[in-house]
Every structure is written in structure tokens, then in C-alpha cells.
Amino acid sequence: MRLAILDHGHGIRTKAMFVLIRVFSGHPVVDAVKLALYRPSFYRAGGLTQEAMRGPSDWSVADRELMAAYISKMNETEFCVAAHTATSVLAYNDGAKVSATVADLETAPLGEPLRATLRMLGKLTRESNLDADDIRRVLAAGASEQQIKDALAVAFSFNVTDRLADVFDFAVDDPAAINAGAKYLLARGYR
Amino acid sequence: MSDITSLHSSLVARVLEGEGQASPEIRRTAFDNERLAEPVRTVVDKVAHRARMVTDADIGTLRKAGLSEDQIYEIVVCAAIGQATRQYQNALAALSAATGRN
């Protein structure tokens, strides 16, 4: 982490919780958790991320985790690609589908509504700009207006998180810790 | 269906106007990525447009300019939320244009 306060600046109760996490999980506390619990009266985006990723939607949890992984790939944010690829693999119980999507969206075994939605999210993330024709293509592929709104909420959340992960230089954990984190995100979510 | 509208508004209000160590003016200008003086201007623009290129040296320039770690933290969070908000609002406007609905 580039800022020492994000490693060591938490209150005493949060520090005690970090000790418990280390003892019971057997893994270090991941940098995303350290950020989420630093001065929660200021940033505290967990509720918004929870709504985007776990709120009611016609997209499955696995679909939305795949969107998070794909947006993070567009941002080249290694920490978030690893974390949300692992979570999507667990949620789909299909590693090949997720790997294929991250490698090449156009040839991945996905339904057209999801493929077109990911394409749109990729353009928004890279170029910060969409026009009405971009949206019409997603509607024509079969995604609903509400599904587009839900996907844009995921994009907002991860376009914030990816930037913070990069600027604060989150450490990429070892595969066992990444998988433990993925299981936690599926069981407990983002709050 | 999921709806982040009110959560987004309260997040933006909290980081711009809530308790903090950076002034509300610098938090707002970091959010907008406008009207900033160096060295904050360069770092905020990198957060907005090429965050993965931010280096230890970039953060070092902010420390040398006299900013505390909490002030740097707040400026970076505002810059990230500002750019993601512009992306989000641009996309919602495209959606309205495509569907003819607000």
C-alpha cells in the first residue's frame, strides 16, 4: 500500500478484528478490506457495491462478478481481475467460461445479451463515453433497459474500486488467499 | 431491481462535504478534475485517466507539497469517484437517448 495509514491507521477495534481475520482465515487481511474499513465515515462504498453486485437483478451474481472482472481487465487492475475472476468462477462453477471471457470476449461461450453488455462496459471503461447507438446494440442483443442500468451500476462501482486499487497499490494475494476471499464474497457480500 | 441512485448521491455528498482533512474546495476540484494547481493536478489527472500508471514518486510529490496521508487519501478518493461518476452519467444519458425515457 502506498499510504501507511491504509495499513496501520485503523482504530483499535478494527485492528483487533484484523487479528481475528488473520487467525481464523489463515490469510493476511487483503488490501481491499483494509481500504473498506479505513475511516468508514468518509468513503464507505460497501453498501453501494452490495446493491450493485447482490441487489435484485435479472443478472445473476456470477454474471455481475464476471462484469467486475471484465471491467477490471479493461482497467488493467491486477488485484481486481484476480479477485473477481475467482469469485465468478466459483459462482458459475465454470472456470472455462470465465477464462474464455477474460481472454477473448468475442469467442467466449456466453449468451448474446451478456456478451453485448460486456462489450458496452468495456467501451465505457476504456473511453469514458457511450452514445445511443452503443445502447441500441445491447438492447437489440436482448438485454433489457433495466439490465443495462444494473450493469452500469457495476461499472460505476468497479471504475472507482479499480482506480483506488491501482493508486494505493493493492498487493495481489496468493491463489489460496484469493480463493478464500472469493468464498467470503459469495457467502457474505460486500458490506 | 437494484438501484444505486440514492447510494451514489450520498457517497458523493459524503466525500465532498463530509468531515475530512482536505478542504472542501480541493476535494471538489479533485472530483471535477478541473481548476487544480500542480502537483495535485498531474496526480488527479492520472487517477482519472490512467490510474495504473500512478507511481510512488507521484504520491511523493504530494507529500513534498505538504499534504498529509489523509489529505492525499481524500483527494484520490474524490478523483476516482468523480471520473467514475462522469462515466456513469454519460452512460445513463446515452441510455435515455436510446430509449426516449429519463
Image (cartoon, coloured by chain):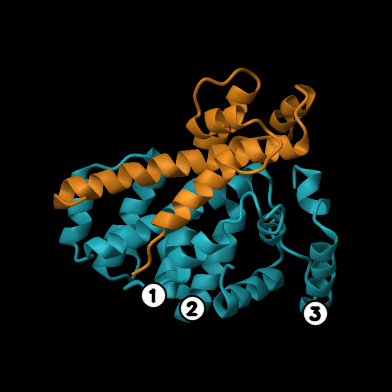
Chain colours: A cyan, B orange
Marks 2 and 1, how far apart in space?
Answer: 9 Å
Residue ID for mark 3 = A24
Contact (CB < 8 A) between labels 2 and 1? yes
Vertically, is B64 above or below A162? above
Chain letter, disc 2 residue: A
Q: Amino acid at mark 1?
A: Ser
- Label 3: how many residues lie within 10 Å, few (<14), some (14-19) or many (20+)? few
Residue ID for mark 1 = A60
Question: The residue tagged with tag 3: helix, strand or loop?
Answer: helix
- Label 2: how many residues lie within 10 Å, few (<14), some (14-19) or many (20+)? many
Marks 1 and 3, how far apart in space?
Answer: 30 Å
Residue ID for mark 2 = A91
Residue in the image at 76% along x and 50% along y: A6
Q: Quadrant of the N terminus of chain B?
A: bottom left
The answer as to whether the residues below labels 2 and 3 share one chain is yes
Q: Amino acid at mark 2?
A: Ala
Across and down, in percent, residue A17 comes to 80, 69
Across and down, in percent, residue A46 comes to 57, 61
Q: Earlier in the sequence, mark 1 or mark 3?
A: 3
Question: Which label sits on residue B64?
Answer: none
The answer as to whether the residues below labels 1 and 3 share one chain is yes
